[in-house]
Amino acid sequence: MMMRAVILAGVMSFGLAAQANAAEPIEGTWLRPSTGTLVTFAPCSDGFCGTVQNGEFQGQQIGAMAGSGTNYSGSITDLAEDKTYRGNAEVDGNNMRLEGCVLAVLCRGETWQRQ
């Protein structure tokens, strides 16, 4: 009986480790080069929420992106202007191209670097 419990515990811990290693590419801390802002994307109820880690807006959420693999979409808030835009992100290794769009035709973006 004791051996069975040990084996079950080992299998469960392996499963948790596999989940931890299966993180989505958007997860982690990213640097927005134009402002020096660090934003951490982590799982949340809306997909992956971005939270500012430094500066004037530290602790505030900038939006949420849903998706998987290399492509994500959702909303992004410019906290300085208090405006929310439709957003898209494409992750390529340690770079993420993040764009915010108005009316789906007027888009501005920037490439962020993983920290």
Image: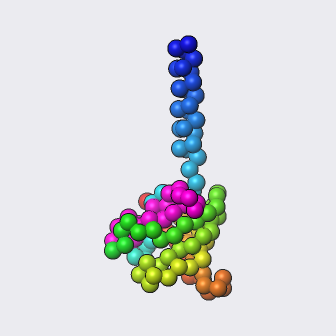
Query: Tell me, what colour scheme is on the image?
Result: rainbow
In this rendering, is residue 29 above or below 99?
A: above
| Residue 95 appearing in the image | yes
In this rendering, is residue 97 above or below 9?
A: below
- Count every numbered label the image shows and give the total: 0
In this rendering, is residue 16 above or below 70?
A: above
> Which residue is drawn at the image coordinates 60% and 70% (left, top)?
74
Q: Would residue 49 be counted in the magenta stretch?
A: yes
Quadrant housing the C terminus: bottom left
- Residue 48 pos. (x, y %): 55, 60
- Residue 75 pos. (x, y %): 57, 73
| In this picture, residue 5 sits left or right of residue 29 | right
> Which residue is drawn at the image coordinates 62% and 69% (left, top)?
73
| In this picture, residue 56 sits left or right of residue 115 | left
| Residue 92 appearing in the image | no
Q: Would residue 22 be counted in the magenta stretch?
A: no
Q: Main secondary structure of the magenta part?
A: strand
- Residue 63 pos. (x, y %): 51, 70
Quadrant housing the N terminus: top right
Range of residues picked out in magenta: 36-55
> Which residue is drawn at the image coordinates 33% and 74% (left, top)?
56
Residue nearest the viewer, comparing 4 with 91: 4
